[in-house]
Image (cartoon, rainbow, N blue to C red):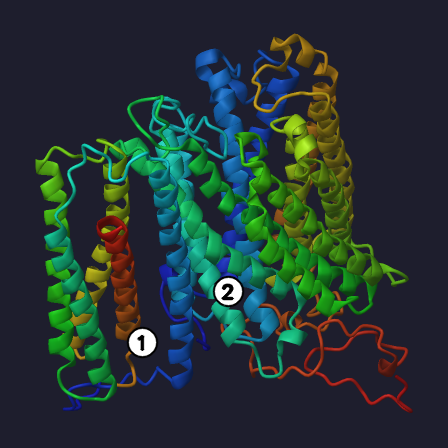
Amino acid sequence: MSGEHKGGFLSTYVFSKDHKYIAKQFLWFGLIWLLIGGVMAMMIRWQLANPGEAFPLLGKLFFPRTGGVIDPDAYNMLFSMHGTIMIFLGLTPALIGAWGNWCIPLMIGAPDMIFPLLNTLSFWTVVIGGAVGAYSLFVPLGALEAGWTGYPTLSTTVGTPGSGETLWAIAVFIIGASSIMGGINYITTVVRLRAPGMTWGKLPLTIWGLFFTAVLNVLFLPVIGSAMLLLIFDRVYGTQFYVPATLTSGGGDPILYQHLFWIFGHPEVYILILPAWGIVSDLLSFFARKPAFGYRATVGAMLAVTVLSAVVYGHHMFTTGLSPMLGESFMLLTMIISVPGEILFFNWLHTIWKGSLRLNSAMLFSLGVIFVFGLGGLTGLFLATIATDIFLHDTYFVVGHFHLTMAASALFGAFAGIYFWVPKMYGRLMDERLGKLHFWCTIIPLTTVFCTMFVSGWSGMPRRYADPTSSPYVAELQYLNEITTIAAFILGAAQLIFAFNFIKSCFWGKKAPDNPWEVGTLDWIPAYPVPHGNFATTPTVVTGPHEFSHPALGPDRDWISQTEALPETEGKTA
Amino acid sequence: MTTTTLPLQDRPTETARSRVDSAFGMAIFIGAWSMAFATMFLAYMILRQRQPIWPPDDVVLPSLAVAIGGTLVLLASSFVVHRAVGLARAGRAGFARHWNVALALGLIFAALQTWLWADLWSAGRFAHTGMYETLFYGLTWFHAAHVACGLIALGWVSVGIARKRYGHSSLSVPVNVAVFWHFVDVVWVVLFVTFFLT
């Protein structure tokens, strides 16, 4: 595994087996899809605020048949594909693919992932999945129209006759396979390749988050894979798994799909959020110059969330006629999952309490995760409670809630990772002034967008209406849609600051020192460019990842590398 | 490129540690795929308990005799492949012979599976005919896809054995393929019990 790259152009730059190169591939791949999904979000917001008006600039290009106007069919495709793209092709690669690949070997002191070929396959599988998804946009009758959840009966051949829906199911299946490959690799690497002395108790919390994510990936992506396969069988071969008895002669069950989808779908929320939690837990300690408060409790809480995430999925299905006993069990379990969530918040706040905060971009985005996840988590209580969920189901309240929890938090986690690790990834510092501008221009409109959705959702605005002015009581709420849309366009424009900063800094930024953040984790030991094989000699770990401001270190230095032992304190006091 | 005359030659890259790594990764892989099949069986349970009568009245059941034959053949294949790995580990002769027998038995199973389908087809029972057919075809298709992958992997290892690619301490690839083949076997036994004995 160690030694220099040998091989031609293809094996170095395309099918590289080096985890650092694959991390960069995942990052760029994810960012490009985030851009595409983001443009779709802008179109959705445009339509909601200005129904029936042509989308400016790009409209004529994308919707030539209607002269730039987003018709209801196109609107259905937009929100369906926006969800699918953001979750499976944007956030998953940019957060889990990129930082999983970058951090796991470097932070545990390993020369590479344990199965480098599987790693390469994982990336190129997601590329194939993305290509199938992209192709589905251009087939006759268009792409998926049944929402990102693809519920039957909308997703049966009766609801959506074109091949777009089938291609979508195939794409999700392929992307799922990629995540499983990644998960197998992550788990095995963390278990088997930790450097000497890197005990489970000395693992950076980033690695813990990624590890639990990998466990959920391996357990629950196969479930969505099978669910998609059954949908493909239904659509292509005429089986009746999800086709209800009333539609044709079948005897299948559309609710079965919802069960299978959410058995995967709820863990997927935590698949996206756990790496962000891990990154945040580390970064708060790094930039508060204090040890992470309650390290073991944080790990325990993440473990508890991982376990509980498997048994709460029914709260997505309160309105399906679930047995009341089952519904109440799911409600109780969902409420219980907020307990480990609160432990995490408590630990994060205690970590930064009275710390010497360094409010750089990475830290701001970490604090941003706390803020947006807090908002999303608190509003989750309304959706976990059956009595309120039945009223709020399928309203914009839900849209606001899940965007804050799984979308914004995971995105902020990815941004924090980018601002934090680009100095080692590309050897250049990100522009801090632009980074801070990006943060403030993101969090303010983002909070406005999704909190306004809480208001409109609470007032009864349903999801997925192509024209909110079409129904009188929803038309009353049009001013809320307009506020949301204005904020959304500011939010979209702010991401251009990031795109500019990212590209400029990666290639022309200020050269970064070897350890710009003065932290002790192993990923900052090798100098840029990190060689193939990472470490010249395998590091031996003796200290935890968060030993900041330890009294024994003296007044001049407040951090210590994980490979250095803490100096003996004179006259040890407990 | 050594020119040893031993029947099996070692790849020096494989260590005791890397063998555990590989077995660990394979165990997680099998765990993941078990979830995929568990999902299919969950679908089966839910859809079957929704039917008033099982099997439905007008259904043409696939041949029990052929299914029993297939089960025995697949079990035998799994046993022989296990024996092949054991022989290879001990550095004894017969690795190639046993492996090829297992491959042949696997091919016979595939033929018997096709027979089961062909019987139903000739009786005019297709995937879209009814709920029994939906479940039977859906689950056996998914399993058969794994049989096909298993056969390709077994064949790949057969070629590798012929080219003397594996030695008694460099058996990770054959061992993993054998584990996958056992998994395919176990899933078939569950499928057999599900469709033919309950």
Total number of numbered discs in the rendering: 2
Q: Is residue A312 left or right of residue A173?
A: right
Dot 2 corresponds to which residue? Answer: A186
Image coords of residue A67 (percent x, y): 49, 12
> What secondary structure is found at the residue carrying circle 2?
helix
Image coords of residue B101 (percent x, y): 11, 71
Q: Amino acid at mark 2?
A: Tyr
Image coords of residue A40 (percent x, y): 55, 29
Q: Which residue: 64% across, 11% down?
A: A469
Image coords of residue A10 (percent x, y): 36, 59
Q: Which mark is residue A399?
A: none
Quadrant of image for the C terminus of chain A: bottom right
Q: Which residue: 67% across, 39% down?
A: A384
Q: Which residue: 30% across, 28% down?
A: A250
> Given contact means CB atoms under 8 Å apart, are the residues at marks 1 and 2 in contact?
no
Q: In this rendering, do the residues under marks 1 and 2 share a single chain?
A: no
Dot 1 corresponds to which residue? Answer: B172
Q: From this viewpoint, is residue A32 visible?
A: no
